[in-house]
Amino acid sequence: MTEKLLTMRGTSLVFVAIAAACFVVADVSIDTLDPWREFARMLSGAVNPNFAGVENLIDALVKTVAFALLGVALGSACGFGLSLLFHRRAVRLVCAFVRAIHELFWALLFLQAFGLNPLTGLLAIALPYAGTFAKVYAEIMEEGDRRPLESLPATTSALSAFLFARLPDAWPHLKTYTLYRLECGLRSSAILGFVGLPTLGYYLHTAFMEGHYQELAALLFLFFGLIASIRWWVRPKLLPVYLGVAPFFLGGAAPINWDNVVRFFTSDIVPAPLRSGGSLSDLGVWASDLFINQALPGLINTVVLTQIALVATGIVALAAFPVVSSQFFGRIGRTFGHLGLVVMRSTPEYILAFVFLQLWGPSMLPAIVALALHNGAIIGHLLGRYSNELPLRLDRARGLDLYGYEIVPRIYGQFLAFLFYRWEIIMRETAILGILGIATLGFYVDSAIQDIRLDRAMALILFTAALNICIDALSRRIRARLRLKTTPECT
């Protein structure tokens, strides 16, 4: 066993120990009286989907696609511009900040300023995606082949060098990553319906609340089909057409009250002591009360839940990747494996958690399982593809020996790279799941918004962003220490 593998194993054991300690203090319980009865109703709905019973079904799907296309396009365009300036520290900090805040948090904030206007949904997707695009696009171009650039004459302008030497090499990778983010954008667009925008999530939420599981199954199956078929209906030649017609399908634009917008940015999110002319001492008391009674408990619960979900994600990924690997299963087996992973990774973790909350009640358990299944399926899919490329001897081992002694040791570095890359993403998702009633930072943010205390909500969102930035920086340091390279596909 190499020194690097020993170091990776030691790092893994540290994280497992931390997760075990977190599990001891976590609120993990089943509080419903008869979860199996509710599960049976959901299962019955899944095998008998009622497509005809869903009102405005096509309209919901079209709006979901329209928000995703325009939000991702806007984020991609802004991110591409920012990627050219990503070497500047100020740009990197701004991008880190905007991508550290989940789309639902942005949506909740913009709802207070713009109301149920399509601009709310577009900005909620475009802002964090712009920060993500900027980072990944910059990494892709930085890691590209530099030989064409070095062969140019010294008199070549910077613009010509970029257009004819750097961009052509990076372009295929940029397109691949942008297509992947469009899949993510569809998930983001869907869950925006949970805060009132007319996308698929709005009808999913209604079906859940009314117990109409047949209609719920129909909505989910159509969404899975939309995600699974993305490579067929998203064609480069058709994208200009899609983007041209998408604004007409966003729905009726509720008028924006610009007085509300001005008040939101100049008064509502300003700490109450400053609005009322209080002193710095009053501001300190306000900040101290907010930190001790809301931010600190929310931070602790967010970290506890994240660390448990991170290790659970790793377990799911290691268990799932063989079902899509040609090293373990034939074509038919891999087809069913791909189907299962597509369902798990295509279902937004917010929706998964919502389902499990109906079954088990409001504890951390639904969030842990939802985060582990969603993120584990994503990593499992990537690991399966990676394992397909491994050369094996003709007299290779079989079964568990092949898995434990040959495949896993050879992919373990890539597994940790994928896992640590998603650490910050799991943290963002953990925070937002508080909106469902789990006492993470999102719970306190949602409570503050419900109480129309937007200054507190904004401060708590800033705490969330700071926590995510710290986790992202720590993840990068661990990956650098272990010399783990992460491909952009796993973001």
Image (spheres, helix red, strand yellow):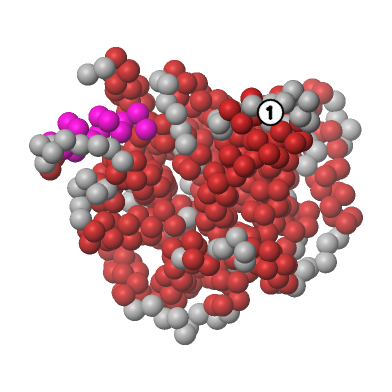
Asked whether residue 172 is drawn in magenta, I would say no
**Can see residue 378?**
yes
Does 488 sit above or below residue 105? above
Image quadrant containing the N terminus: top left
> Could you tell me which residue is drawn at 86 percent across and 49 percent down?
263
Q: Position of residue 80 (x, y in %)?
A: 69, 42
Does 324 sit above or below residue 10? below
Left or right: 452 as drawn, with respect to 355: right
Question: What secondary structure prevails in the magenta region?
Answer: helix
Q: Residues within 10 Å of mark 1 (few under 14, many from 20)?
A: some
Asked which quadrant contains residue 269, the reply is top right
> Could you tell me which residue is drawn at 55 percent across and 59 percent down?
186
Residue 75 or residue 127, whichever sits in front: 75
Amino acid at dot 1: Leu
> Could you tell me which residue is drawn at 54 percent across and 77 percent down?
57
Q: Which residue is mark 1?
A: 152
Q: Furthest residue to the top?
A: 3
Q: Position of residue 149 (x, y in %)?
A: 64, 29
Left or right: 474 as drawn, with respect to 309: right
Left or right: 176 as drawn, with respect to 249: left
Magenta region, residue range = 401-414
Left or right: 219 as drawn, with respect to 46: right
Asked which quadrant contains residue 22, the reply is top left
Q: Position of residue 42 (x, y in %)?
A: 35, 69
**Can see residue 205?**
no
Q: Furthest residue to the bottom?
A: 52
Q: Secondary structure at mark 1?
A: loop
Residue 82 or residue 163, whichever sits in front: 163
Q: Position of residue 250 (x, y in %)?
A: 69, 68
> Could you tell me which residue is drawn at 25 percent across and 37 percent down?
391
